[in-house]
Image: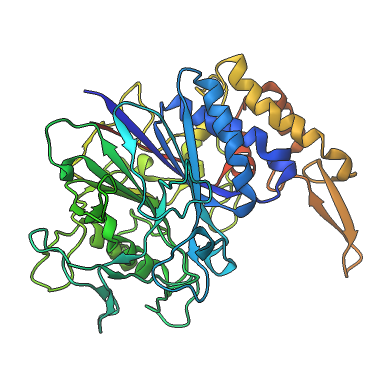
Amino acid sequence: MPDITIVIWNVETFGDAWLAQRGANYTPICRFIARVLDEVDADVFCMMELRSGGTPYLATLRAAINNLQPAEYWRYEWIPGAVVPFTPFPPANAADLGFLQAAHSEGYALLWRDKPEFDMLDTRVALSGHPLAGNSRIGLVFTGRTPALTPAGWFSAPNFDPANPPAVWNQLDFPIPAPIHAGDIRWDQSRRPCYFVLDLNRVGVPRSQQLLPILVFHAPNSLFSTRFAVQCNAYSTELYQVDDTTQPAVAMTNVNQAFAAGDFNLNRNDANDQNTDAYFAFSNDFNYQPINNQGGAQLRNIWVSSGNLPDNLTAVRLSRQDGTPIVTNNPRDYYWLAIDNAFYRNLNAVLPAANYSGPVYDIVAEVMQHGNLVNTPGKRAVVQSFAAAIAAQVANYPYTQPVTNTPSTRKRGRDDQWIYTPIIANLQNYIPYSANLNLGYFTNARRAAEFVVNSISDHLPLVFRFTV
């Protein structure tokens, strides 16, 4: 049976002006992302942490992946992550959404390739920042099961009954990143999930088995917002019903399968953190008992969380929590936290195998010598292009940081000591790092992790494959 591969990735602050690390016009990082997508044979890619400055580079990314796959054709759309102030419910046009500072100035990008196994379903209202032929394929969540704060300090929401779905779905609010009170939610300026719907080419089955909604959410990270945002995400209408826009009028349709993923900022492996109980809102049954209004989205399967702990770790770091630098030569030592995850219902997942990089793509290992991202001259040229981009900036950093040998600017501090601002932070030594960039691969794990954190992202991509 044919497969479909979905990649979900928090590409840190895509569009911010990191010219020294990422290169002018973002060409090197776009070529790198394209290599990752090609390597895992991706069909759909959703990016978190898209900034407004990154939207022009999505065409560069699409061109890079099309160049690697000339027999394929990729398309892209993007959407801001928040509703602008004073917008009435529901938003009616793209100007009602924005990259708002209160929502961490973020949005989402969606790229997909033409493939006979699925079509990307249109949304009923075009809100994309890059609609194709006047239609959008990516939307934001606006409605769902209405949450209420309980005395126990959690949300509850009316359970979903597939046999008796709501006649009308109500407005769904979300927390802003730093609300004043735990559980405060609001309509505008809050970071929302995006969604898109695959119309699967399954012949002779009802629409409930053809429509696959996919939600992606970057949850805010604060004591008063994170767990409540994760719960609200699980209440999203699209995990229960979607509008079958192949019909001329609104046609809300129960969905037999669904997929929700993202950077939830809750460590799935931390059994001592009661905030991770928010994940129950995904995995509990629709009619979870004995507690009324605590039903879940019935996404019983958890993709990244497993008995194999290394597969769970999705964030990349260069120092431990006490500030001690990590200097080992094991790529796994630079990974921590199971905060990027996926939940799904009624999908036949293809588990990781020798020829399949999943569920978390091991980028640090793959850019080391003989890794799959650097094992040909063409792939090494992608890493080498970062060296060229950095070299073009060196003249703007005329001094050398004495400990790391890194090109830097400097100024006098109040104690009359020099304060250095390096071209790239967190390097142990610029000289061997630069030499590795010029080689097009890295000869130890520390330098490979420095490259990933400084030039790509502090997150690893999730790779989910399922059979149609």
| Image vertical order of residue 311 relative to residue 160, above or below | above
Is residue 448 left or right of 336 when viewed as pictured? right
Along the line of sight, the residue nearer the viewer: 5 or 98: 98
Q: Is residue 47 visible?
A: yes
Give the residue drawn at x 54%, y 33%. 62
List x then y, in percent, for residue 182.
40, 79
Indicate the position of residue 126 as horizontal and vertical percent values: 43, 53
Find the residue positioned furthest to the front. 248
Q: Which of these two is toward me, 108 or 210?
A: 210
Q: Residue at x 43, y 65 (%)?
A: 91
- Residue 88 in the image: state x and y as whole percent: 44, 74
Q: Which of the 4 quarters of the picture holds residue 406?
A: top right
Residue beneath the point at 52% across and 23% down: 371
Q: Quadrant of the N terminus?
A: top left
Q: Quick check: 436 above or below 25? A: above
Q: Is residue 432 visible?
A: no
